[in-house]
Image (spheres, helix red, strand yellow):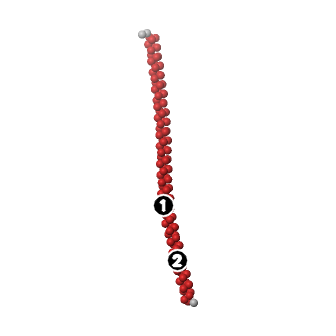
Amino acid sequence: MGRQEILEQLKKTESNIRTKIENAQQKKNEILENAQRDARKLEHDAEITIKKEIDGLMLQVKHDFDEERQKILKKGNAEATLLKKNASIGKTKELFIKKFEEYIHV
């Protein structure tokens, strides 16, 4: 093999190596882009799942809060009614005693 043939063979080999390096770099870039896209999708899906779980928990907490609030209001209304009734009875007693005392003194 002559010197010229050896140089041509080296140039051809270098060209093949450059092509393989470029192909490998393109493949690497594709893999990175796919991995980044997959990671973004996983993150997005996770955010949606978490949001759904949080929304569900918030609804449950609101429901529990509303139930407890209704119990407290019902108990408070019952106590208020009883207090009004007792206050009314007390006023009636006082009025009866006052009238009775007025009647006795007259």
Q: Residues within 10 Å of mark 2 (few under 14, many from 20)?
A: few
- Taking depth in this image into account, of 34 and 87 the one nearest to the observer is 87
Q: Which corner quadrant holds the C terminus?
A: bottom right
Residue under label 1: 68
| Position in image of residue 31 (x %, y %) | 46, 31
The residue lying at 52 percent from left, 74 percent from top is: 85
| Residue lying farthest to the top in this orientation | 2
State the separation of the CA atoms marked 2 and 1: 32 Å
Quadrant assignment, res 100: bottom right
Q: Which corner quadrant holds the N terminus?
A: top left
In this rendering, the answer to whether 33 lies above or below 70 is above
Residue under label 2: 89
In this rendering, the answer to whether 53 lies above or below 8 is below
| Position in image of residue 105 (x %, y %) | 56, 89
**Is disc 1 placed on a helix, strand or loop?**
helix
- The amino acid at mark 2 is Ile
The residue lying at 50 percent from left, 61 percent from top is: 69
